[in-house]
Image: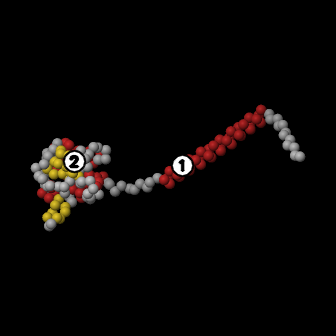
Amino acid sequence: MTEVILAKVDHSPEQFEQLRKTTAIVLMAIGLFLSGSLLKWTVSNKLANMETVTESTITAQVRDKQLACLARNIYYEAGSEPFEGKVAVAQVTLNRVASGQFPKDICKTIYQKNVVYEKILCQFSWVCEGKAGGTNNYVYSQAKEIALYVYANYENIKDVTKGALYYHADYVNPRWKLDKTATIGRHIFYKERDGI
């Protein structure tokens, strides 16, 4: 039979204090190592799961051009309309850009022309009418402010047109087969029917 003999070791208070300090240092080193390992794992895991951010192609120059086009559209389409009417025209313009049915560029959407039965049709009547002339400074200044506001807050403000992509003045009747969404000022707004 094997006997285990435990030897009694007497430590002096100085030796006991040294042992306590050494143990504390070893435990602290182990804690730091584990904390560092956990931090490294967390960061590498986050980086591995992070989406790649692509660089924006929108420069200040491009943004300013887009805003100028939007302001002109508001001015010529809704210059005499109340504030809500100007906002509505801006929202329809941006709704078109976001829809995937029109160019993904404000200026290209506004100036888009289609040929139907050998007749040129513009998305916005002022483009075909050639109204790119002089402006009333006060009304154009309002149009620029509204363009900037709607452009900057498009996803966060209520769409007063309820998703409209089209509108016409109340004194014409194009007999569109679309769902009417709102009447604001002298404009009647429409969106495509569900299922179309």
Extreme-bottom residue of the structure: 118
Instruction: Please tell me which residue is depicted at 27% across the width and 43% down the height of the picture.
Output: 158
Q: Residue 181 carries which label?
A: 2
Instruction: Please tell me which residue is depicted at 48% across the width and 53% down the height of the picture.
Output: 49
Q: Mark 1 points at which residue?
A: 42
Q: Quadrant of residue 9?
A: top right
Extreme-front residue of the structure: 195
Q: Which of 112 and 163 is in front in this view?
A: 163
Q: In this view, does 12 lie above or below 40?
A: above
Q: Which of 117 and 62 is in front in this view?
A: 117
User: Please, what is the three-letter code of the amino acid marked with disc 1?
Assistant: Thr
Q: Quadrant of residue 35?
A: top right
Quarter the C terminus occupies: bottom left
Q: Position of residue 114 (x, y in %)?
A: 19, 63
Residue 144 seen in the current view = no
User: In the rendered structure, which disc, 2 or 1, sits on the residue that comes first in sequence?
Assistant: 1
- Label 2 close to label 1 by CB (< 8 Å): no
